[in-house]
Structure formats: structure tokens, C-alpha cells
Image (cartoon, helix red, strand yellow):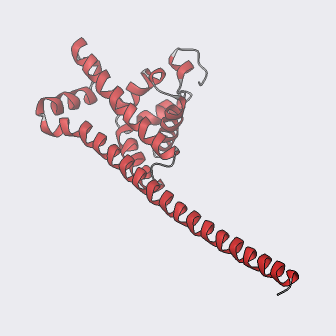
Amino acid sequence: MTLDILGNLGEFVGAIGVVLSLLLVARQMKRGVEQTRRNTRSVRAAAFNSMVENSIRLLEHVFRDSELADFLAKAAADPDRLTPGERLRWDAYMTAIFRHFGNLMYQWETGAMEEKMWQSYRRSFKDHLEEEAWMTWYLDHPHLFDQRLADEVRGILEDLAREGVPHAVAWKDGGGRIGFKASLGSGTEG
């Protein structure tokens, strides 16, 4: 063999080595992508499980404790008749509920929750805001929550107003304000 033949053979073997290395890297990248997908599904499943547990935790007290259920029914029917202690309890409960919905919305926005699950939770949120006491409470306390939740509540109340829900229609006819500045009486949306 001549030196030229050996050189050509070396280049050929080197080229085969490069191709094999590239195939190995591509295979490992594919495995990495598949592992990332599995990890993403696992994280989403864990996040979803946590959201469901939080929802159940909030609801569990209502169906296990008849006193709390009676209190919530009383508060929703006429929050103006609550004693100072009951008002504190109502405020704490409502803060927890609205924070929960804010968290659900955040999970959806970040991709941890699928669209169809968010729509299910949003329908539940809308059902609650059909109660005048829920809407009134939120409109008195929007400064406790972020602007994204205010925007979501605004959208739901606009839907309810279009559907003819009386308190939502009155809210809309009154200017439809929600937000930090509106809660401070400035008359502008925050």
C-alpha cells in the first residue's frame, strides 16, 4: 500500500467515525427530548394534583362542617347582617377562595394547566360570581389581588351582564370598574 491509499483509507475511516458520532449524538438528543417530555408530563400531573387537593381542601370544610355551611349560606344571602367576627371569617374565606382562583389562573397562564381544565375552573368561578355577595365582596377588595385576576373577574362580570344577571348589569351600567384605583375611589380602572 502506498502512502496515498493509507491516507485515503484514514480519511474514509475518519468520516465514518464522524457520521457514527453524529448518529449517536442525535440518538442521545432524541432520548433527552423524550425524557424532557416525560418530566414535563410528570410536573404537570403533580401541579394538577396539587390544584385538585387545594380545591378539595377548600370545599371539604363546607361539606364536613354544617356550621360553616350554614355560615357561608348566611353570608352569601346577606353579608351586611354579619357580626364583626362573622365579617372577619367571611373576609378570610373569600380571600382564600379568590387567591385559589388566582393561583389556578396563574397555573393555566404558565402552561401547568391545560385549556380545558382552566375552562372548567373558570365556569365554576363564573357560577360563584353569579352570587351578588361574591361580586360585591370582590369589588370591595380588588386591592388584595393582582391585576390579572381583576381582568378575569371583569371578563366574567361582562359575560354575566350580557346574560342579564341583575347585579352584573348594575355593575356594568355603573361603569364596570374593577381594580386597585377603582377600589380607592378614584373612578379610573387600575
Residue 9 vertical placement versus 45 (above, below): below
Residue 129 horizontal side relative to residue 174, left or right: left
Residue that appears at 40% across and 38% down: 101
Instruction: Reply above or below: 67 against 112.
Output: above
Residue ID at (52%, 14%): 184
Q: Is residue 170 left or right of residue 50?
A: right
In the image shown, does 12 or 49 lie closer to the viewer? 12
| Res 62 → quadrant | top left
Query: Looking at the figure, which quarter contains the C terminus?
Result: top right
Would residue 154 be found to the left or right of residue 90 on screen? right
Residue 178 or 160: which is nearer the viewer?
178
Whether residue 171 sits left or right of residue 19 in the image: it is left
| Percent of width and height locating residue 185 | 54, 14
Measuring from the top left, give residue 133's x and y in whole percent: 34, 29
The reply to whether residue 165 is in sight is no
Residue extending furthest toward the top: 84
The image position of residue 74, as x and y in percent, is 21, 27
Is residue 84 something one can see in this rendering?
Answer: yes
Name the residue nearer the viewer: 144 or 15: 15
Residue visible at 62% across and 66% down in the picture: 25
Q: Quadrant of residue 86?
A: top left
**Residue drawn at 44 percent across, 51 percent down:** 119
The image quadrant of residue 21 is bottom right
Number of numbered discs overlaid on the protein picture: 0
Quarter of the image with the N terminus is bottom right
* Residue 147 image point, x, y percent: 54, 29
